[in-house]
Image (cartoon, rainbow, N blue to C red):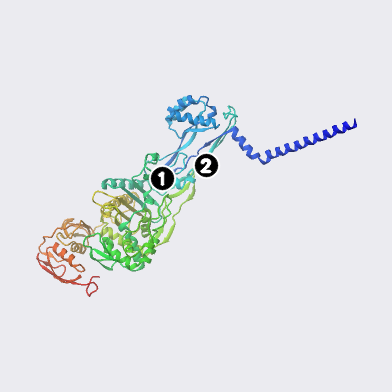
Amino acid sequence: MAHGSKTVKKRLVFLLLICFALNIALMGRVFYIQFVRGDELRSKAKEQWTRDSPVEPKRGTIYDRNMNPLAISASVKSVMASPPDIEDVEKTASLLSPALNIDKEVLIKTLEEAKKKKKGSIFIKRKITDEEAEAVRKLNLKGIYFTEESKRFYPEKNLASHVLGFTGIDSQGLEGVELIYDKYLRGIPGRIISEKDALSRELPFGLEKYIPPEEGLNLVLTIDKVIQHIAERELEKALAENNAKKGTIIVMDPNTGEILALANKPDYDPNNYKNYPSSIWRNSAVSDVYEPGSTFKIVTAAAALEEGVVSPDDKFYDPGYVVVSGVRIKCWRAGGHGSQTFAQVVQNSCNPGFVEVASRLGKEKFIKYIKGFGFGETTGIDLPGEARGIFNPDKVGPVELATISFGQGISVTPIQLITAVAAVANDGKMTAPHVTKALVDKEGNVVQEFKPRVIRQVISEDTARELKSLLESVVENGTGGRAKIEGYKVAGKTGTAEKYADGKYVASFVGFAPADDPQFVVLVIIDEPSTGIYYGGQIAAPIFQKVMADILKYKGVKPQLSDSEPKEAVKVPDVRNLYVEDARQVLMKHKLSVRVEGQGLVVYEQVPAPDSEVPVGSTVLLKVSDAKTDKNPATVPDLTGRTMREASEILNAVGLKIDIKGSGFAVRQNPPPGAEVEIGTVVQVFFEPPGSTGGSE
């Protein structure tokens, strides 16, 4: 009996130990679940009994500099479904598909997959129209409900589309400042949290929690809506009139680097950006490169003046070409410009003159200034996709040095070029270009201000002042005559670059006004005009004139030269039938400016007509042709520095004959220049080889 009692006690003790061990294990398990995995399991449980619907924040508004809205956001409905609450998928899809213009079979498949995966909620169609919302509301379908989202609208449609960019379905920035400043504009999403049962159905009397979204910050641009309208209007007209492929106009404040307008054509409507090819979205002003042509001569001139290798009065001679390392480089004008000062080299946009200037500078110094003006690197403008341009100093030899001096053999972006020219206008200080002024909250408080940033002093104030004067003379007396604005001093430079495709050109003009106190810089680029006219002075300069004139008027910049002020008048001399260079000299002696149109050596028409009274400094248009003069007596032209062939052609054009003495370049002649002789008179011209006493300068 005692033995049996002991056995029972042992069994009880063993059972107690087992129970104790089980309790310890259970307590350990509870501790593990409660404390080790507590947060994780609570989160999973919460997901199972709650539905978390996102609430999209309102995206910040984008304004122009005068607080005109350019991009706004409005609340719109999005249709959602709670798959567990939908009892008849096919019936729901049949009713819903016509209301939302969604394929019925696609909708059935979407809903069935969501039910199979036990999803609590899914989007059916996002950001629907008011008409679609009303149609869905009338259906009153179980398991179908609305949520509020924000949709982007661009009230000015195409205006400044390449600056603004656009947003995607999730209101995320995809292009333009919408992309660059997305993290500020987007805001912080909110949530709606509601309880649901084990089958993911919403509980009728369950708790619901609303966490409101935080609106994004508003963005204020440097763009001026009115100036942007002016630029786009004139660019659109220009492309139509010149049947051009595309074009760009940029307007910049040289003192701050603020971009007041940036227009590319063709453009697009960001409200419907998907309806346009993606190539149209590309911002040519910052992403495309082109050969700047003669507008780049501003950089060459700046470097040469700063280094002291040239002065405005230095003498040059242009026979119509220059030979560099065996390569013959022509002047744009047949027969060249003859003897001229550096100031006239700039006015006439003379290629051989700039080739000589670059050779005086030398490779190392020229490259230093090309880099100093920002070419070969990005400007850092706050727009996406900026290109660096194409400039490789290691590949610059004598020929490349020569061609780069007049803007060929180097490729730049429009924003690089206008930034460089703005540095000249801003007394040599290069300022970083930018399109944003500030970030502000919904109360209008400035959260962050984007202030002007000076990058470096590229050239001295004295050099900049001297170059501004030369560029003013380009408009007054040179190739930029069509950029003149009555009452204002205007400075600028024309550019014509031939593309590698035969017969394709890029015409451009860049300038600033008022010339002595620049407030605006404007760059005009017309790509591939196809009406037979392609020179920058003929196409781009008039566009610049219209844009700049309207800007000055809009901004209230008073004319520097009042029409009421008395001006000295002068009679226009008759220069018809004269050799064009002689005609130029005669007009300049009468304090008149000259603009030449056409190809040839002899003036056949002039505007204004002879004996007209005009103010001093007025421009006389000379139309030249290859026809011979019939004027008798004839005026003997200045042949100094001409080759035998050129001298023969010039004398033949004015009805005179030549008697050649020697070889090389003309050093003297008889009768002398300016003498009046009978048609058919023989002119003795003495030639000497280059380098001989009395040779060309």
Residue beneath disc 1: 164
- Residue 19 left/right relative to 33: right
Among numbered discs 1 and 2, the one appearing first in the sequence: 1
x 79%, y 36%: residue: 17
Pick the front one: 178 or 549: 178
Residue 367, image x, y percentages = 38, 63
Image height of 41 relative to 446, above or below: above
Image height of 146 relative to 602, above or below: above
Residue 396, image x, y percentages = 36, 63
Residue 104: tell me if it is visible.
yes
Residue 428: tell me if it is visible.
no
User: Identity of the amino acid at label 2?
Assistant: Ile
Name the quadrant of the N terminus.
top right
Task: Find numbered disc 2 in the image and state the secondary structure of the residue it sits on.
Answer: loop
Q: Which mark is residue 188?
A: 2
Task: Find numbered disc 1 in the image and state the secondary structure of the residue it sits on.
Answer: helix
Mark 1 nearby-residue class (10 Å; few <14, some 14–19, many ≥20): many
Pick the front one: 108 or 658: 108
